[in-house]
Amino acid sequence: MGLSTLLVLADGRLPAGGHAHSGGLEAQVAAGRVRDLDDVAGFLTGKLATSGLVAAAFAAAACHRPAEWAALDDGLDARTPSPALRKASRAQGRALLRAGRAMWPLPPTGPSPHQPVALGILAHAAGLGPQEAAVAAAHGTVAGVASAAVRLLGLDPYATHALIARLAPECDLIAADAARRAGDPVDDLPATGAPLLDIGAEHHATWEVRLFAS
């Protein structure tokens, strides 16, 4: 495992646009469903088990077989019913590939693959394996939302990072499960969904004033 390389991918300072997205949290805060740190913990636990698992599985699969990126991208598109979430994922994938090209030679891809697929391709180019790609995806699911929570709810950043630390074992379990499926056919990869995130994303996309792009 290239631990230092994995840290590069998981670093929130990577210029891939993740800071502009709340992972669906902004809409749930506005709806009154997430109001404090305990609510954020519940939100993250649910997100990890659903869209987080899907992201980790597709990142692992794309790392394991980057030549199949187009089929994986189509499979992830089919698992993302919200047009707003598809748009956000592709915007982040495009930004991630732009950052990746500055660091490693990347294989040919479409201009805007979904973010987990782009992450897997980048992990492969960096010499990492499916497990590391899945860890980066699972960690990103937690860390991005937690960072947004500090800004949206005015939470104590120390307490918020303590939450990230408590969720680290769950991230590892999700990543291990995802990595075991890296060789599965696209149709057999996880397809767990979170309807409230889909609905919230569509409402959020209509707002004239918002802090985050998604």
Image (cartoon, grey):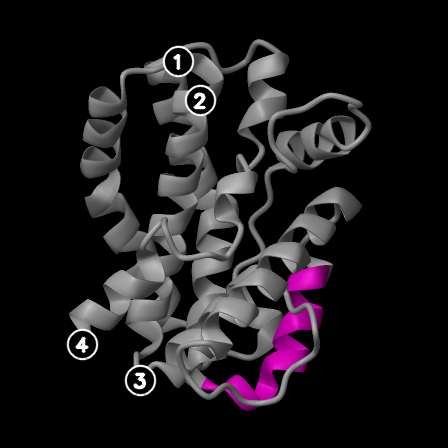
Can you say which quadrant of the picture contains the N terminus? bottom left
The CA distance from mark 3 to mark 2 is 34 Å
Q: Position of residue 30 (x, y in %)?
A: 62, 14
Q: Secondary structure at mark 4?
A: loop
The CA distance from mark 1 to mark 2 is 5 Å
Q: Which residue is mark 3?
A: 127
The reply to whether callout 3 and callout 2 are in contact (CB within 8 Å) is no
Residue under the point 36% across and 51% down: 13
User: For the residue carrying disc 1, how many other residues have a C-alpha within 10 Å: few (<14), some (14-19), or many (20+)?
Assistant: few
Judging depth in this view, the residue of 146 and 166 nearest the camera is 146
**First reached walking from the N terminus: tag 4 or tag 1:** 4
Q: Which residue is mark 4?
A: 1
Q: Amino acid at mark 1?
A: Gly
Q: Which residue is mark 1?
A: 154
Q: Amino acid at mark 4?
A: Met
Q: Secondary structure at mark 2?
A: helix
**First reached walking from the N terminus: tag 2 or tag 4:** 4
Which residues make up the magenta segment? 65-77
Residue under the point 52% across and 64% down: 96
**First reached walking from the N terminus: tag 3 or tag 1:** 3
Q: Amino acid at mark 2?
A: Arg
Looking at the rendered image, the disc whose residue lies closer to the viewer, 4 or 1, is 1
Q: Secondary structure at mark 3?
A: loop
The image's mark for residue 151 is: 2
Outermost residue to the front: 102
